Image (tube, rainbow, N blue to C red):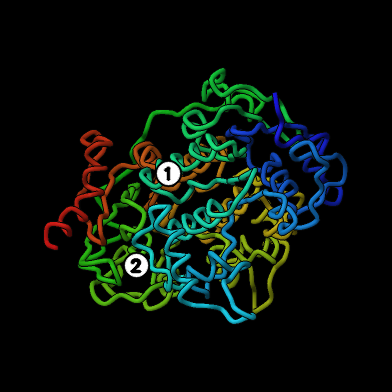
Amino acid sequence: MTTLLAVNGITKRFGAVTVLDGVSLDVRPGEIHALLGANGAGKSTLCRIISGLLASDEGSMRLAERAYAPRSKQAAERAGVQIVQQELNQVRTLTVAENIYLTRLPNVCGVVRPRRLAQQARRVLDHFGLNDVDTDTVMGTLGVGRQQMVEIATALDRQCRLLILDEPTAALSGGETQRLFQRLRTMRDQGIGIIYISHRLDEVAQLSDRITVLRDGQAVCTRPTSSLSTDQMVDLMAGAASGQQHAFRSFATDQTMLRVENLSAGMVRDVSFSVRRGERLGIAGLVGSGRTELLRAVFGADPAQGGTVQIGAGRPRLFSQPSQAVAAGLAMVTEDRKHSGLLLRQSIRSNTTINSLGRRFASFGIIRRQRESQAAQTMAAQLDTKCNHIEQMVGTLSGGNQQKVAISKWLVRDAEVFFFDEPTRGIDVAARRRIYRLIESLAEAGKAVVIVSSDLDELLETSDRIGVMSAGKWVDDFARGSWSAEQIMRAAFAGYRDAETVA
């Protein structure tokens, strides 16, 4: 059978650590080839080598039967290889149109033609179903889900023989995911090869033709997708049977720990809700429904126009900046760890303790490095963070391990109310179970927990109660035992149907 891409014995080392150890795989024309593995297994590193972002230390590649060794991303693109990485690669201060055509701006003698730029960008967005995104919108003002869709649309617009997608649906809604899948199947039918990385095994089973599993930097197997169940996929990634989902336990009490009354902020309109001590409140809704905007307004990261927030027995108020919310006992694990959750050029130790320096790790203005190190080591062990040492720069970790560090800084702080915005985005199946157990342990310890997730199954598994946001409004509330996925999805669309009726 014809081979589009052949990877032979690829090895990559970072210092004394071998990230890829003699990995081989092949991708056929007109095939969606899933690449599976736990965080740190080497998936993203392999794809960065294929796309010219990294050079391998050993091994070789062939593309369409010709030797292939790109020295840059641009060289790979010229050969027909496109990649959309897990971490967004955009200029947040430029417009959507400028980001789409960043390296190929329409111009005459070096002068950009704005009208042609807008027309071409509009065509790209409309082709991908992003009719509601304005070409002149500044990229950084869009939510992460919309940013992700723009980046995918940009890659799909370019001519390519091989497309690499690294966790493309992590921030997408179910409808957006299906729209992407339709486009990928069309590309497959056109003979384009696709490497697809995802921790969402139901997606892999639904979409891919073959699967290659990486474990600890080595290729474990390549098999037809139809020959593997999702449980078998997990076992191959973990190297042993993984822990299974266990029965839900509720620790909710009658004591209210967070009360939000009539909060309005930007698109968020007159929202009220409360969370009790020991309760896990999930917030569902479509991408763009206002879930993240609600958390940011409560946390003081975005200005609110009205309403109040009360934590515990504290006075009702609005926080004008996050430091006030943190001091009052509120913690927030943001959805965009790269830009708002971590200091990527700082160590694991520094990121773990940064929110608690004055409170726990300093005496008379002097930072106690040994205390810091002990706390960071404890957190790394508790969350099973894959790293060489706690002085390793966070930016060198895999996406899932970066997420663990982003969570650990709030665990060290020991707040009373925890906000988790997409807590398992980009995290493998085994690590996801650890995060769920960690959230359960917070509830058992009497913390109030709020979880925003685009994965409805995640909310159904982890929540005592699920509230639904739609078009900026809190439209419904469901208790465990009295909900169904269908009810929640209907509620998620309710605000948009109402808006259409009013219009």
Q: Residue at x 46, y 58 (%)?
A: 124
Residue on which disc 1 sits: 177
482 sits to left or right of 218: left
Q: Which sits in the foreground, 298 or 187?
A: 187
Q: Residue 444 placed where, x, y %?
A: 41, 43
Label 1 crowd (10 A; few <14 / some 14-19 / many >=20): some
Q: Which mark is residue 298?
A: 2
> In the image, what residue type sits under mark 2?
Val
Q: Is residue 428 visible?
A: yes
Whether residue 211 is situated above or below residue 269 in the rendered picture: above
> In the image, what residue type sits under mark 1?
Thr
Q: Which quadrant would residue 392 be assigned to in this image?
A: bottom right
Q: Residue furthest left?
A: 502
Quarter of the image where the N terminus is located? top right
Q: Residue 51 placed where, x, y %?
A: 71, 50
Q: Residue at x 78, y 36 (%)?
A: 65
Whether residue 202 is situated above or below residue 356 in the rendered picture: above
Q: Residue at x 52, y 34 (%)?
A: 189
Q: Residue 28 placed where, x, y %?
A: 66, 31
Q: Nearer the viewer, mark 2 or mark 1?
A: 1
Callout 1: helix, strand or loop?
A: helix
Q: Which sits in the foreground, 389 or 28?
A: 28
Q: Which sits in the foreground, 184 or 54?
A: 184
